[in-house]
Amino acid sequence: MKLLFALFNYFPHGGQQRNCLRIAQKCAQAGNNVTIATRTWEGPRPDEVTVETLGCRGWTNAGRNQNFITDLASLVAGQDFDGVIAFTKMPGLDVYFASDPCFEAKFQKNKKRLGKLTRRYRLYRKWEEAVFAKGSRTQILLITDREVPLYREIYGTEPERFHLLPPNIDRRTFSESDRERARLAKRAELGQAADTTLLLTVGSGFRTKGVDRAIEGLAKLQSTAGNEAQLVVVGHGKPESYQRLAKSLGVGDRVHMLGGRTDVPEWMLAADLLVHPARTENTGTVLLEALANGLPLLVSDVCGYAFHIERANAGRLVPSPFSQTQFNQLLQKTVDSTDLQQWSANGLNYAAEEDLYSCHDKACELIEKFVAAKAR
C-alpha cells in the first residue's frame, strides 16, 4: 500500500516525532511504500521512508499549521495514496494517532470566552472536529484513553473508532556494573563527586514539563554537607529563562541544561530520581522509560501514565491541584527516603512483566487493516 504520514515538524527527540518515524518504518518494513510529509525535518533522514518537506509559511502557529494542511491536501490530490495517517489533527485523515489532549475541553476549562472570536480557536476547533465528529471516517489510535470521555461528550465520537495501543518504549538490558559505570561517568561529565545526588528531568517543552517547578524545588532542597544535589535537564527548549531562574535562586551552578541528547538511557541509569512535575502530559513515555531503567520517580498525577508508577510502587505522585510548597516537601521527602532502592527494584519487575513495548507493531497492524478495509 502507498501510505502518507503527516506531522507539522520533525526533530529527533520529540515523543510524537519518534512515534511517527518508528511506525512509518514498521509499515515500510512490512512492504508498504511510505512517505512522511512535514514542514521541517531536523536530523538524518531514514533510508526506507521518503521524506517530503513542505516548508514553513505564516506569521503565527495557527497560520503555519493551516498553510501546511493546505499544502498537504495538494500533495494528496497529486499522488495516489491509499491511506493518510497524521499525528496532528486535521481534515481528510484515514487514521489519527492521538498524542495531544482535547483542545475544546481544555478551552472550556480555561473559560476564555473572548478566545472563541479568534482565528486560532476557529481553526483548532475545526481540525479537531474533522477527526472526532460523529460520522467522521477517521480511525483513532490512542496511547491513553483518559480523553475519550471528553471527545465523546463534546463531539459524539463513536466508541468503536477509538483503538487503545500499548505503550512504546524500547526493551533494555543492563547489569549493575553498567549502572555503576554510568553513575561514575555522568557525574564525572558534570565535574561532580561519585556520591552526588543527581536529579533528572527529561522532555521537550520546558514549561509544560515543569522545569521551573523542579528548579524551585532544588533551591529549597536541604542537602547534606559536601553533597549538594544537581539537576540535569535533557530535552529541546529555550533554556535562557530557566537558567536565569536558577541563578536568581542561587542554584545556577547546580542546574545543567544539556539540550537534546542520544544518551538518555545512560542518564537514567546514572540518576537517583526522575523529577517530572508536569503541568499537563497526555501520556509521559519518559515515565515508563525510567521504570525500565530502575529509576525511581516523583511525577505529577496529571500524567496519563502516572497510574503505572502507582501500580508499580516505583515512586511518588504529586497531587493536583499543584502546590509548589507541597512539591518542595515531597521532593525533600523522596530524596531522603530509604525506599529508593526498593522503588528501583519494583520498577524493574513491573517493566519485565507488563507489555510496555509493542505500540508501534500494533499501530502498524491497525493501519494496514483500516486502509485495506477502506480499499474494499
Image: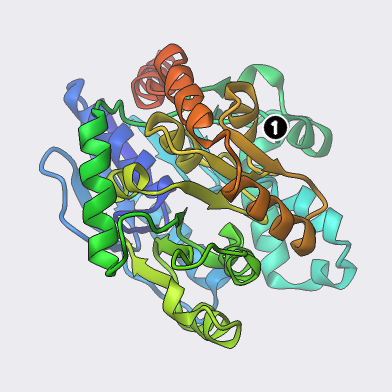
* Left or right: 120 as drawn, with respect to 294: right
> In this picture, is 1 found above or below 290?
above
Residue 16 in view here? yes
Task: Give the residue type at disc 1.
Answer: Arg
> In this picture, is 270 found above or below 239?
above
Q: Which quadrant would residue 47 be assigned to in this image?
A: top left
Q: Which quadrant would residue 322 be assigned to in this image?
A: bottom right
Q: Position of residue 100 (x, y in %)?
A: 58, 47
Q: Residue at x 24, y 52 (%)?
A: 184
Q: Position of residue 213 (x, y in %)?
A: 64, 65
> In this picture, is 197 found above or below 355?
below
Report the quarter where the C terminus lies: top left
Q: Quick one: which residue is furthest to the front in this view?
A: 225
Which of 268 and 134 lies nearest the eye of the viewer? 268
* Left or right: 76 as drawn, with respect to 231: left
User: Quick one: SS at disc 1?
Assistant: loop
Q: Residue at x 56, y 83 (%)?
A: 250
Query: Callout 1: few (<14), some (14-19), or many (20+) C-alpha neighbours within 10 Å?
Result: some
Which of 312 and 13 lies nearest the eye of the viewer? 312
**Mark 1, residue position:** 146
* Left or right: 334 as drawn, with respect to 341: right
Report the quarter where the N terminus lies: top left
Q: Residue at x 63, y 32 (%)?
A: 136
Q: Quick one: which residue is furthest to the left in this view?
A: 47
Q: Position of residue 344 (x, y in %)?
A: 46, 31
What kind of colouring is applied to the model shown?
rainbow
Which of 123 and 141 lies nearest the eye of the viewer? 141
Q: Position of residue 328 (x, y in %)?
A: 70, 60
> In this picture, is 207 found above or below 277?
below
